[in-house]
Image (cartoon, rainbow, N blue to C red):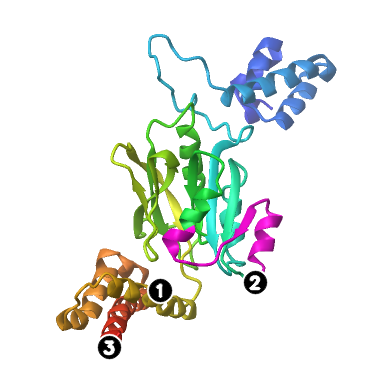
């Protein structure tokens, strides 16, 4: 025992008060062994041990009173996450279509700490709605009219002023959950928060240190901004007086299922992009059409740092470049057809 626990344990033999202080640092199975070795009656100190240990645990998760000399100051411990006991006054909504393989991960990343989870489905046939409902989410059907309009419909189904939007292929990381919880301790100081959404590929469990990401307004007070009504772009538009801020933690984006899925999405999404270009009567030159593929490849491979992913980086860079080219090819196809 002397070698195993050191001088502090020898002091515990001399005084119950020293022993009780030691229980704050030593695991309970060690404590019980020490009692027997010390020749004390375990029953004598049983109550003392059971009282002390919960008290030290509770003290770690209860904010202390603010110091009068530092009004408004909260230390890292004082800003402790309280979501184990209280859900935040946030409505989280997710739009979905045939996301049975991914919707559970999205819901599970938020359901324990937001007030409600809402899924807006546009006609899934793979069990997405059933999975969402089994996880406690409220589900609503709305025919697909584009990204922005679908998300605006989702906003109307939220009962809280504060809204968090994630997609079915996105996950709130533990670090981001804690950061959001701290915003509501006691209340957010800004109106809209921008979140860094980073790629997580199928062979990864979290974003690589060099992972490409993009910033989006995803946590917001609906009185200060709403999603645009664009069919292609799903972006929250803050009002001029809104106070915005970037969050530090990242949202995980599991965006790619497979190469086959990438190509199908590229074909579907380029249809919407081409229609948007035509409706806005944007002029696309032949030079732009010719240069779109090589420029887009270089942008993805180097600026998005996909070159660091080896062969997989080459594959997704080529696919990104092809998708960018395909939308312009469809615009020229429509023009040649007199549309």
Q: Identify the mark nearer the N-term, 2 or 1.
A: 2
Q: Nearer the observer, disc 3 or disc 2?
A: 3
For residue 72: magenta?
no
Residue at image position (62%, 67%) is 100
Q: Identify the mark nearer the N-term, 3 or 2.
A: 2
Quadrant into which the C terminus falls: bottom left
Residue 117: give x, y in percent of width and height.
59, 49
Label 3 packing within 10 angstroms: few (<14), some (14-19), many (20+): few
Q: Which residue is mark 2?
A: 126
Q: Which residues are magenta?
A: 127-150
In the rendered structure, the answer to whether residue 57 lies left or right of residue 50 reads left
Q: Nearer the viewer, residue 260 or 152?
A: 152
In the rendered structure, the answer to whether residue 7 lies left or right of residue 308 reads right
Q: Label 1, secondary structure: give it.
A: helix
Q: Identify the mark nearer the N-term, 3 or 1.
A: 1
Q: Which residue is mark 3?
A: 338
Compared to residue 228, the image places residue 337 above or below, namely below
Residue at image position (19%, 83%) is 290
Residue 49: give x, y in percent of width and height.
73, 20
Q: CA distance from mark 2 to mark 1?
A: 21 Å
Q: CA distance from mark 3 to mark 2?
A: 39 Å
Q: Which residue is mark 1?
A: 269
Q: Label 3, secondary structure: give it.
A: loop
Q: Nearer the viewer, residue 44 or 68?
A: 68
The mark tally for this picture is: 3
Label 1 packing within 10 angstroms: few (<14), some (14-19), many (20+): some
């Amino acid at each position: 025992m002397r070698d195993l626990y050191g001088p502090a344990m020898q002091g515990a033999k001399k005084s119950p008060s020293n022993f009780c202080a030691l229980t704050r640092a030593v695991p309970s199975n060690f404590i019980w062994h020490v009692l027997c070795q010390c020749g004390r009656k375990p029953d004598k100190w049983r109550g003392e041990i059971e009282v002390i240990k919960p008290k030290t645990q509770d003290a770690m998760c209860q904010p202390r009173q603010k110091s009068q000399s530092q009004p408004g100051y909260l230390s890292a411990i004082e800003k402790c996450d309280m979501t184990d006991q209280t859900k935040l006054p946030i409505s989280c909504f997710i739009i979905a279509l045939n996301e049975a393989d991914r919707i559970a991960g999205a819901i599970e990343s938020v359901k324990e700490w937001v007030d409600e989870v809402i899924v807006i489905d546009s006609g899934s046939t793979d069990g997405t709605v059933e999975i969402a409902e089994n996880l406690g989410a409220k589900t609503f059907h709305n025919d697909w009219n584009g990204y922005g309009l679908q998300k605006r419909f989702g906003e109307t189904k939220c009962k809280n002023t504060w809204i968090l939007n994630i997609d079915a292929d996105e996950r709130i990381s533990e670090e981001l959950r804690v950061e959001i919880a701290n915003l509501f301790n006691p209340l957010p100081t800004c109106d809209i928060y921008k979140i860094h959404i980073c790629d997580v590929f199928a062979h990864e469990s979290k974003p690589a240190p060099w992972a490409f990401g993009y910033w989006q307004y995803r946590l917001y007070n609906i009185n200060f901004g709403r999603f645009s009504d664009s069919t292609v772009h799903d972006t929250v538009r803050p009002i001029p007086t809104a106070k915005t801020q970037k969050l530090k933690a990242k949202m995980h984006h599991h965006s790619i299922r497979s190469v086959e899925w990438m190509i199908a999405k590229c074909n579907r999404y380029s249809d919407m992009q081409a229609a948007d270009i035509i409706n806005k009567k944007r002029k696309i030159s032949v030079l732009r059409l010719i240069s779109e593929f090589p420029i887009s490849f270089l942008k993805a491979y180097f600026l998005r740092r996909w070159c660091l992913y080896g062969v997989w980086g080459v594959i997704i860079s080529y696919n990104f470049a092809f998708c960018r080219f395909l939308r312009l090819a469809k615009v020229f196809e429509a023009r040649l057809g007199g549309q």
